[in-house]
Amino acid sequence: MKLGVLFSGGKDSCLAMLKASKYHEIACLITILPRCKESYMFHIPNINLTSLQAKALGLPLIKAATSGEKEKELSQLKQAIQLAIKKFKISGVVSGAVASTYQASRIQKICNKLNIWCFNPLWQLNQYELLKELQKEKFEVIISGVFAYPFGKEWLGKKLDKKAINELLEINKNTPLNLAGEGGEYETFVLDCPLFKKKIKILNAILQYSNYAGVYRITKTKLISKK
Amino acid sequence: MKIEKKILLVSTCKEKLHKLEFIKPVADILAKNKIKFFIKHYKNLNKKDLEKARKIIICGTALKDNEYFCNIEKFNWILKIKKPLLGICSGMQIIAFLFHGKIEKKTEIGVVEVKTKTGKRFKVYTLHNFYVSPTKDFIPIAHSKKCVQIIKHKSKPIYGMLFHPEVLNKDLILKFVNNEIQDFE
């Protein structure tokens, strides 16, 4: 069946999309752009770059701006999915929900109302296993935001590779945190994954950081061919 | 040589992709606790699988997936089985239906509170559009505001949970496996 991916540009939505693509056709991406609330925009510093990722994937993208108010967001997300049903004939959506029952049940409710399938291929996946899968599938992921102790400025823009995963494991020994960052401890941005036809090269970025909160705002990029 | 019997996980998912969402989380709980298991889809289940199993768990499926109701005859083994059986969500609906329960439309999505008959309260994750009201063959053990959430057969080791214990109540799956089912109450 044709599916739309709820796409943030981070590692979870990309990995969920990869898993779904093994059984179904990915027909489009759906990105929610929170407007208004500055805090939201701060937390997802490169959400505008989902257009570039869509280009790298060779997939159409539906961008829906939301007001940032929780209740309104739900109907705005529903409208975006309805548009994807109409435009790309999707029969279901894929989300990268891992452990958040709040996030998962919101999506399930919308899909149920629209009578479409809902797939959450990372649901309840062990955080370490999730990070290891990114390695196995040769994802190229960077940390695009940190929002918790003890993440220092050096984490911004860092590649989420084997070394970084080991460092996260070390941090986790002393500070309880969600290894995969689902608790909002950190945000990621995917530069390349097996479904990308081209990969993203960062030419310029701005770092903003103070007191264990910071973002890596990508300002200049280009798509390069994959060898 | 005595062969160690394993837990049989029965998939009710129409879509293969949903195995990651409804079977793997249960399998991961067992694997983490070094409990051996094997997985079979209900359409491919045979007599040997049931003989090989120590206990059986029928896992849930997606909200939009009701295919199992169209193939209910594939579950007739439930009526004869003597081994401990736990039905999760669609699994509970199948069990209750085979024992002549009535299908009703009742939607619950998300976290709700359940209360056991002994007065214990806890949060569970629900995901269902249907509910099968259990007949007198079953004792209701826990309720949410909308309906019965845990059932137990009066004379057989058969249990049903309408919610998904693999999400917020992983201990309940281990209790079923480790014979601590009195704790459901």
Image (spheres, rainbow, N blue to C red):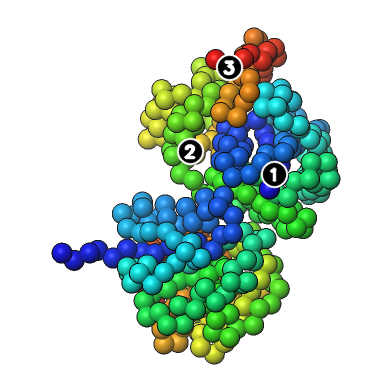
Disc 1 chain ID: A
Which residue occupies 68% across, 36% down? Answer: A7
Depicted B36 relative to depicted A124: above or below = below
Q: Is residue B78 visible?
A: yes
- The amino acid marked with disc number 3 is Lys
How packed mark 2 is, by other alpha carbons closer than 10 Å (few <14, some 14-19, many 20 or more), is some
Which residue occupies 61% across, 72% down? Answer: B69
Tell me the quarter of the image containing the C terminus of chain A: top right
Disc 2 chain ID: A
Tell me: A213 left or right of A61: left
Quadrant in the rendering for residue B114: bottom right
In this rendered view, identify the residue nearer to me: A208 or B70: B70
Report, in whole angstroms, how far the alpha carbon at label 3 lies from the one at label 1: 25 Å
Report, in whole angstroms, how far the alpha carbon at label 2 lies from the one at label 3: 24 Å
Residue holding disc 2:
A130
Residue holding disc 1:
A3
- The answer to whether the residues at label 1 and label 2 have Cβ atoms under 8 Å apart is no
